[in-house]
Amino acid sequence: MKRRRSQERRPTKIRVRLQYRNIDAFIHNYAVNISRGGIFIVTKTPHPVETVLSFEFLLTPPGDAATSIIRGEGIVQWIREYDETTPDHAYGMGVKFTYLDAESRALIERVVTAHLAVKAGGESVDQWARAWNVSADQLQELLNSSSTAVDFEEALSEIERRLKRN
């Protein structure tokens, strides 16, 4: 039998300071860590799996005041511990979004779209749709529903599987 909590879990609050000179630099450099469904947060001290987080990402250009760019809540899904024998490997935690404000959702959509375009060699959704013999609207719907994909290759594989089923 599962134990019931007498109170709701309170989110652990975290602030992530990102030192990029502007939003475009953030999109270019951090896009690989963001999907529509979640985000990878680089940290040497990840929170345990199932930790509920309330997070805020702040853009802190050198010499300027910090600007809040992503705000929301999520749950830690997995962690990758820091290993000093391989300091170049990514370490941190994967967080699944449970809530994002409208501005944050819009920015994440922009980040994901830009990342997909770059990884696709700058090709548009229309070009990919023609290559897969589907409408651009159908492909966009598939891209939007691929929120669990961790990276571009995974998103493409997921879309190809769905197209083959239809």
Image (tube, rainbow, N blue to C red):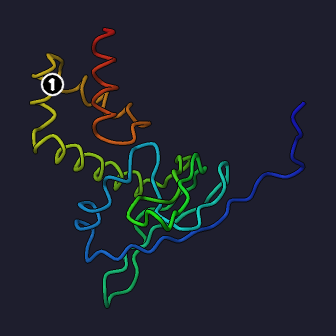
Residue beneath disc 1: 129
Identified at 25% across, 22% down, the residue is 138
**Which quadrant is home to the C terminus?**
top left
Residue furthest to the top = 166
Q: Is residue 70 above or below residue 2?
A: below
163 horizontally vs 18: left or right: left
| Residue 34 locus on image (x, y percent) | 38, 51
Identified at 61% across, 49% down, the residue is 75
Identified at 16% across, 34% down, the residue is 125
27 horizontally vs 128: left or right: right
16 or 73: nearer the viewer: 16
Amino acid type, callout 1: Ala
| Residue 154 locus on image (x, y percent) | 33, 34
59 horizontally vs 23: left or right: right
Q: Residues within 10 Å of mark 1 (few under 14, many from 20)?
A: some
| Residue 91 locus on image (x, y percent) | 48, 59
2 horizontally vs 88: left or right: right
Q: Is residue 59 above or below residue 109?
A: below
| Residue 50 locus on image (x, y percent) | 67, 48
How many numbered circles does the render carry?
1
Element type at marker 1? helix
**Which quadrant is home to the N terminus?**
top right
Q: Give the image quarter of residue 65.
A: bottom left
Residue furthest to the bottom = 63
Identified at 14% across, 29% down, the residue is 128
15 or 65: nearer the viewer: 15
Q: Is residue 111 above or below residue 157?
A: below
Q: Is residue 8 above or below residue 44?
A: above
